[in-house]
Amino acid sequence: MEARLEYCGNYIEITDFHYYVDDGITNNPYNCAFNIKVKSGVFSGMADGCEYDYNELQKFIKALEEMILFKREEITFIEIGYGNKIVFNCDKTGHIKVSGDIQGDVGRHILKFEFMTDRTVFPKFIKELKNL
Protein backbone atom coordinates (compact mmCIF):
# COMPACT_ATOMS: atom_id res chain seq x y z
CA MET A 1 0.00 0.00 0.00
CA GLU A 2 1.14 3.51 -0.64
CA ALA A 3 0.21 7.15 -0.26
CA ARG A 4 1.70 9.81 -2.53
CA LEU A 5 1.66 13.61 -2.36
CA GLU A 6 2.81 14.99 -5.71
CA TYR A 7 2.99 18.49 -7.12
CA CYS A 8 4.87 19.67 -10.23
CA GLY A 9 7.05 16.56 -10.35
CA ASN A 10 8.06 16.74 -6.69
CA TYR A 11 6.68 14.18 -4.26
CA ILE A 12 6.76 12.39 -0.97
CA GLU A 13 5.51 8.83 -0.92
CA ILE A 14 4.85 6.30 1.81
CA THR A 15 5.41 2.81 0.37
CA ASP A 16 5.36 -0.79 1.58
CA PHE A 17 3.21 0.12 4.58
CA HIS A 18 2.55 -2.64 7.10
CA TYR A 19 0.54 -2.47 10.32
CA TYR A 20 1.29 -5.18 12.87
CA VAL A 21 -1.96 -5.79 14.72
CA ASP A 22 -0.41 -7.77 17.59
CA ASP A 23 1.99 -4.90 18.32
CA GLY A 24 -0.93 -2.47 18.21
CA ILE A 25 -2.91 -4.55 20.67
CA THR A 26 0.02 -4.63 23.12
CA ASN A 27 0.54 -0.85 22.68
CA ASN A 28 3.97 -1.30 21.15
CA PRO A 29 4.48 2.09 19.41
CA TYR A 30 6.59 0.44 16.69
CA ASN A 31 3.49 -1.15 15.15
CA CYS A 32 3.83 0.25 11.61
CA ALA A 33 6.69 -0.16 9.14
CA PHE A 34 7.12 1.61 5.79
CA ASN A 35 9.50 3.40 3.44
CA ILE A 36 9.52 7.11 2.61
CA LYS A 37 10.47 8.17 -0.91
CA VAL A 38 11.14 11.81 -1.78
CA LYS A 39 11.81 13.62 -5.05
CA SER A 40 12.61 17.31 -4.79
CA GLY A 41 13.90 18.98 -7.93
CA VAL A 42 16.65 16.79 -9.38
CA PHE A 43 17.35 15.09 -6.04
CA SER A 44 15.65 11.98 -4.72
CA GLY A 45 16.09 9.45 -1.97
CA MET A 46 14.46 6.78 0.11
CA ALA A 47 14.37 6.12 3.83
CA ASP A 48 13.68 2.45 4.40
CA GLY A 49 12.78 0.66 7.59
CA CYS A 50 10.74 3.57 8.99
CA GLU A 51 8.51 2.92 12.00
CA TYR A 52 5.56 4.70 13.54
CA ASP A 53 2.61 4.24 15.89
CA TYR A 54 -0.72 3.70 14.13
CA ASN A 55 -2.56 5.88 16.67
CA GLU A 56 -0.13 8.73 15.96
CA LEU A 57 -0.71 8.22 12.23
CA GLN A 58 -4.43 8.80 12.78
CA LYS A 59 -3.64 12.04 14.64
CA PHE A 60 -1.33 13.10 11.79
CA ILE A 61 -4.08 12.49 9.20
CA LYS A 62 -6.52 14.57 11.28
CA ALA A 63 -3.94 17.37 11.51
CA LEU A 64 -3.52 17.36 7.71
CA GLU A 65 -7.30 17.65 7.32
CA GLU A 66 -7.28 20.62 9.68
CA MET A 67 -4.39 22.23 7.81
CA ILE A 68 -6.15 22.22 4.45
CA LEU A 69 -9.12 23.87 6.19
CA PHE A 70 -6.75 26.63 7.44
CA LYS A 71 -7.06 25.47 11.07
CA ARG A 72 -3.33 24.68 11.38
CA GLU A 73 -0.27 26.39 9.96
CA GLU A 74 2.38 23.73 10.61
CA ILE A 75 2.53 19.97 11.07
CA THR A 76 5.63 17.90 11.69
CA PHE A 77 5.84 14.17 11.02
CA ILE A 78 8.81 12.43 12.66
CA GLU A 79 9.03 8.68 12.33
CA ILE A 80 10.31 6.95 15.45
CA GLY A 81 12.77 4.48 13.95
CA TYR A 82 15.46 6.83 12.61
CA GLY A 83 13.97 10.30 13.08
CA ASN A 84 13.16 10.97 9.44
CA LYS A 85 11.20 14.22 9.36
CA ILE A 86 8.66 15.90 7.09
CA VAL A 87 7.32 19.38 7.89
CA PHE A 88 4.24 20.96 6.29
CA ASN A 89 3.86 24.77 6.49
CA CYS A 90 0.65 26.31 5.14
CA ASP A 91 0.32 30.03 4.42
CA LYS A 92 -2.90 32.04 4.33
CA THR A 93 -3.34 31.51 0.58
CA GLY A 94 -3.20 27.71 0.76
CA HIS A 95 0.37 27.27 -0.47
CA ILE A 96 2.11 24.55 1.48
CA LYS A 97 5.85 24.14 1.82
CA VAL A 98 6.92 20.54 2.30
CA SER A 99 10.40 20.19 3.77
CA GLY A 100 12.48 17.92 5.91
CA ASP A 101 15.23 15.37 5.83
CA ILE A 102 15.33 11.65 5.32
CA GLN A 103 18.22 9.25 5.65
CA GLY A 104 18.99 6.06 3.83
CA ASP A 105 21.35 3.21 4.43
CA VAL A 106 21.18 3.74 8.21
CA GLY A 107 22.33 7.35 8.07
CA ARG A 108 25.04 7.06 5.42
CA HIS A 109 22.96 9.16 3.04
CA ILE A 110 20.91 12.21 4.01
CA LEU A 111 18.53 14.12 1.76
CA LYS A 112 17.40 17.56 2.88
CA PHE A 113 14.48 18.65 0.75
CA GLU A 114 11.98 21.42 0.24
CA PHE A 115 9.30 22.01 -2.34
CA MET A 116 6.08 23.98 -2.66
CA THR A 117 2.62 22.55 -3.21
CA ASP A 118 -0.90 23.71 -2.56
CA ARG A 119 -3.80 22.32 -0.62
CA THR A 120 -5.62 21.02 -3.72
CA VAL A 121 -3.41 17.91 -3.86
CA PHE A 122 -3.91 16.98 -0.21
CA PRO A 123 -7.39 15.36 -0.30
CA LYS A 124 -6.09 12.52 -2.49
CA PHE A 125 -3.01 12.09 -0.25
CA ILE A 126 -5.16 12.08 2.88
CA LYS A 127 -7.51 9.49 1.37
CA GLU A 128 -4.54 7.26 0.52
CA LEU A 129 -3.12 7.65 4.04
CA LYS A 130 -6.47 6.58 5.48
CA ASN A 131 -6.42 3.49 3.24
CA LEU A 132 -3.00 2.34 4.47
Image (tube, rainbow, N blue to C red):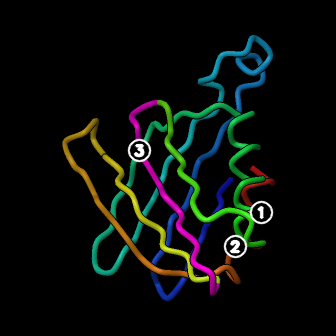
- Residue 129 percent location from the top left of the image: 72, 56
Q: Quadrant of residue 64?
A: bottom right
- Residue 76 percent location from the top left of the image: 53, 51
**Residue 84: assigned label:** 3
- Residue 71 percent location from the top left of the image: 74, 65
Seen in the image, is 105 located left or right of residue 130? left
Q: Earlier in the sequence, mark 3 or mark 1?
A: 1
Looking at the rendered structure, the kind of residue marked 1 is Glu
Looking at the rendered structure, the kind of residue marked 3 is Asn
Looking at the rendering, the stretch of residues picked out in magenta corresponds to 81-93
Q: Residues within 10 Å of mark 1 (few under 14, many from 20)?
A: some
Q: Secondary structure at mark 2?
A: helix
Whether residues under marks 3 and 1 lie with C-beta atoms below 8 angstroms apart, the answer is no
Q: Nearer the viewer, mark 1 or mark 2?
A: 1
Where 113 falls versus 30 (above or below)? below
Which of the two residues, 106 or 89, is positioned nearer the viewer here? 89
Seen in the image, is 15 located left or right of residue 62? left
Q: Which residue is mark 1?
A: 65
Where 114 falls versus 109 (above or below)? below
Compute the Cα span from label 2 to label 3.
20 Å
Looking at the rendered structure, the kind of residue marked 2 is Phe
Whether residues under marks 1 and 2 lie with C-beta atoms below 8 angstroms apart, the answer is no
Q: Which residue is mark 2?
A: 122
- Residue 21 percent location from the top left of the image: 78, 24
Where 52 falls versus 38 (above or below)? above
